[in-house]
Amino acid sequence: MDQPRVADKRVPLSRDTIAEAGLILLNEIGLDKLTTRRLGQYLNVEGPALYRHFPSKAALFDHMAAVILFPVLRAPRSGEPWDEWLRSIAVRSCDEVMKYRDGARLVAASLPIEPLDLLSTPMREAGFSAEDSLYASKLLTRFMVGWQLHEDSERQRADRPEEHYDHDRAFTFAVDSIINGLRLRLARTMASRIDD
């Protein structure tokens, strides 16, 4: 079993190093067997050492999900259209989550708040109303979690593969369909502002 770098007692524990070790252990034993006790054993520390950083297992899982998602979430680059930016974020986020055993279940069980802000703020800047930006962010994040859960389930049922089904193309088709709907919504919003 690979030891996480935080297992070296010369490296102090932090929220990020604990979460990174949790992700390594997640890949080895899965979400159902991942407990704070197992993680403490893996890191060669007593339980209270973890609780100084995370008050609960739920808080730990929230941070583990954030460690997966936050490196992917970024603001649009200068001149980058909002729809291309949003598509890129969706595809990269899905790719990152699916790298982890039970990654979709971890993200579905977690409540990292920041992703909504990281998505809705650029959408407001693109012209969406504050309400539409929030709803669009929730739509996309909830769609992605559901998609990832379904993909994860299909992976575990590899004995029944679907013929002629390209998972990546199906995902981008779905994301593009959502973005096309958002484009229409934005066009209507902009038209109503001109009429007012």
Image (tube, rainbow, N blue to C red):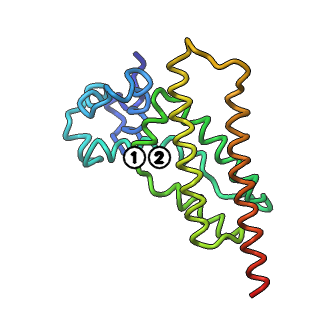
Q: Residue at x 62, y 16 (%)?
A: 161
Assess disc 1: are there few (<14), some (14-19) or many (≥20) residues with their C-alpha within 10 Å of its C-alpha. Answer: many
Please indicate whether residue 46 sits to the left or right of residue 42 in the image.
Answer: left
Query: At label 2, which amino acid type do we have?
Result: Ala
Residue 3 in the image: state x and y as whole percent.
39, 22
Assess disc 2: are there few (<14), some (14-19) or many (≥20) residues with their C-alpha within 10 Å of its C-alpha. Answer: many
Give the residue number, with chain letter if any, for mark 1.
62
Q: Secondary structure at mark 2?
A: helix
Q: Residue at x 65, y 58 (%)?
A: 75
Rendered view: 47 above or below 126: above
Residue 148 in the image: state x and y as whole percent.
55, 36
Residue 145 in the image: state x and y as whole percent.
52, 42
Q: Secondary structure at mark 1?
A: helix
**Residue closest to the eye, 110 or 150:** 150
The image quadrant that residue 28 belongs to is top left
Query: At label 1, which amino acid type do we have?
Result: Asp
In three-dimensional space, the C-alpha distance between marks 1 and 2, rounded to whole angstroms, equals 6 Å
Q: Can you say which quadrant of the picture contains the N terminus?
A: top left
Q: In this view, which residue lies farthest toward the bottom?
A: 196
Q: Are marks 1 and 2 in contact (CB under 8 Å)?
A: yes
The tag on residue 66 is: 2
The tag on residue 18 is: none
Rendered view: 196 above or below 76: below
How many marks the image carries: the answer is 2
Q: Residue at x 55, y 24 (%)?
A: 154
Rendered view: 92 above or below 26: below
Q: Can you say which quadrant of the picture contains the C terminus?
A: bottom right
**Residue closest to the eye, 178 or 85:** 178
